Image (cartoon, grey):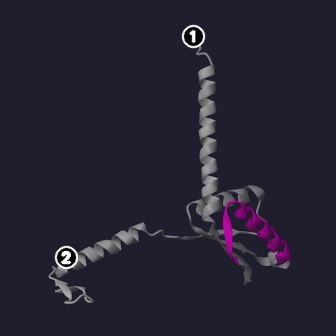
Amino acid sequence: MVEVSPTAKPPVVKLIDYGKFKYMLQKKENEARKKSAVIQLKEIQFRPNIEAHDLETKLKRAEKFLEQGDKVKMVMQFRGREMAYRDAGMEKFRNIIKTVEEYGALVESEPKFMGNRVITIVAPDKKVIQARAKAKQQATKQASKQASKEAAKQPEAKS
């Protein structure tokens, strides 16, 4: 017996199958777990003397992670004589962070030194990322329309 309405006069109760009741609760929990979004923490590592193309590649990867809704942990590691130029490396790291912010990221933790590494965590700004996704979709639609118009204008070659 399960009490349905304890405040009513007289209290309302009903008979239920307890096994079925537990099964339904478990189904509800599983459904809620499916609908919840899992945010992962992805890590991207840099060095202070990274080349421009390598930096572009890593920044594209960071942009992809942010679009997927994942947080990104950015690490710049210093080795050997690079430790003597920590200020220059930190300046480069701040420039990298500014670039990532343009992709739609919010800095969760400011860059800080931990031994021979500088670490920061950025999270996706959902509004900015959704706006960028819409702009990309519109751009691809316009490009496909133009391509189809140009293909229709060109006369087919006769053999």
The residue tagged 2 is: 20
Label disc, if present, on residue 29 of the rendered structure: none
Amino acid type assigned to the residue bearing label 2 in the image: Lys
Residue labelled with disc 1:
158
Where does the magenta region start and end?
A: 85-109
Tag 1, which secondary structure?
loop
Q: In the visual, does 36 lie left or right of 9?
A: right
On the image, the x and y values in percent for residue 142 come to: 63, 38
The local crowd at label 2, few if under 14, some if 14 to 19, many if 20 or more residues have their Cα within 10 Å, is few
- Which residue does the image show at 63% across and 37% down from the upper left? 143
Residue positioned 29% across, 76% down in the render: 26
Magenta span has 60? no
Q: Quarter holding the N terminus?
A: bottom left
Compare residues 19 and 100 and report the one nearer the observer. 19
Q: Under tag 2, what secondary structure?
A: helix
Q: At label 1, which amino acid type do we have? A: Lys
Q: Among all residues in the image, which is located at the extreme front?
A: 9
